[in-house]
Amino acid sequence: MTSQEFINIFSEKLQISRTDLTVETKLDSLDEWDSWNKLALMTLLDEKFKINLTSKELGAIHTIKDIIVRIGDKVID
Amino acid sequence: MNIEYYLPTNSITNQDLAILFPDWDYNSFEQKIGIKKRHIAGKNETALDLAEKSAKLLIDKIDKKSIDFLILCTQSPDYLLPTSACILQDRLNLPTSCGAIDINLGCSGYIYGLAIAKGLFESKIASNILFVVAETYSKHIHLKDKINRAIFGDASAATLINNEFQIGEFVLGTNGNGFDELIIKNSGMRNINEPCLDEFEYSKGNITSDSHLYMNGPEIFNFSVTTIPDLVLETAKKNNIPIQNIDYFVFHQANEFMLEYLRIKIGIPTDKFCIDIANTGNTVSATIPIALKNAYCNKKIKKGSKIMLVGFGVGLSWGATIITL
């Protein structure tokens, strides 16, 4: 999966209205980055990558790039 | 069915909360979380008062003298001492020969109460056990804590345990390492000398303090999705019942988002899986008996149904069993 493909599934899962997301987008700048969508990200990582994100790891995620780094080599360009 | 429940008369809808929190997208909340309203105890109405109401609905139909044990599960006692169950014994006019204890558990409390009641029954310590769960988390939640005010509701439920329905084998578990993921830090003796009273924001737009309920939502979610699927499989195995032969699954009604995720992860068909949270919210230890009673009244379960009950939450604590009606 490429970064852009990940951005697409991330955006779809969290129902994000903005269409200009990049790996550098600050998640706190998104209206949709609320408590429930943080859980939606956890379900996405579990379903697609078998990753159970801890709340500590979630707290260290500030951009989409941070998520991609956590996923590891399953997302490459 | 030997279960009755009571909901406080006051209720708060999502529209009511949206007036208090104008930035809140309650349509999205309702769609994802499945809660439309929650009942909230009155200012002077405690969990003990709710317990009395549900218990009276149940025992008014039977000979009170036959009740020989009372278990009350609550985390909102009237006093640290005496035990609320002792006060409840008197209010219900139960015989003084009746044993009475409180158990302090949250969302796993119904399962643990059943386990204790089964032990009392099978060891012949008691033969007719009144088990009441009663909770008023609304009194623990900070007024500015939007998310927990939206999730939790108050309620009580009473169950009579004798030989009316069969309680199967239990799988129970605890991980106290997560004790501070769902906690009221200033609620006991630990911080009595130096309580921190400051408000703090724990998630976008949600305020609490150490004297109020704090829940680390992502950590509780992570705990649930990693623990519960195995718990379900182990419970089926321990009861020697293939999972496809279980007629109905009643999980603790935490929120629809989590329940639906667990249902898909475990592979339970929608028609066998209880979602009953819209009109009550998460009522902690009361969600399972309320859902059981409603499922029975709505004919989703009947005499002979094999039902898996699964509780999980604060502690961290979890447990499951299979009952046969």
Image (tube, rainbow, N blue to C red):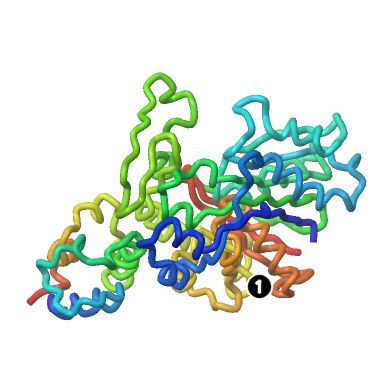
Look at 72% across and 70% down and name the residue there.
B305
Left or right, B274 with reference to B157 = left
Residue situated furthest top in the rendering: B193
Is label 1 in a helix, a strand or a loop? Answer: loop
Residue B323 at least partly seen: yes
Look at the picture and state if A34 lies above or below B93: below
Quadrant in which residue B142 is drawn: top left
Look at the picture and state if A59 lies above or below A24: above
The amino acid at mark 1 is Asp
Q: Nearer the viewer, residue A29 or B297?
A: A29
Count neighbours of disc 1 (C-alpha within 10 A) and say few if under 14, some if 14 to 19, many if 20 or more. Answer: some
Look at 75% across and 69% down and name the residue there.
B297
Left or right, B55 with reference to B235 = right
Residue B141 pos. (x, y %) = 48, 44
| Chain to which the residue tagged by mark 1 belongs | B
Left or right, B177 with reference to B45 = left
Residue A49 pos. (x, y %) = 26, 70
Q: Which residue is mark 1?
A: B247
In which quadrant of the rendered image does the C terminus of chain B lie?
A: bottom right
Look at 68% across and 33% down and name the residue there.
B84
Residue B262 at least partly seen: no
Left or right, A49 with reference to B40 = left
Look at 73% across and 63% down and name the residue there.
B324
Residue B299 pos. (x, y %) = 74, 74
Q: Nearer the viewer, residue B167 or B136?
A: B136
Residue B288 pos. (x, y %) = 63, 58
Residue situated furthest left in the rendering: A77
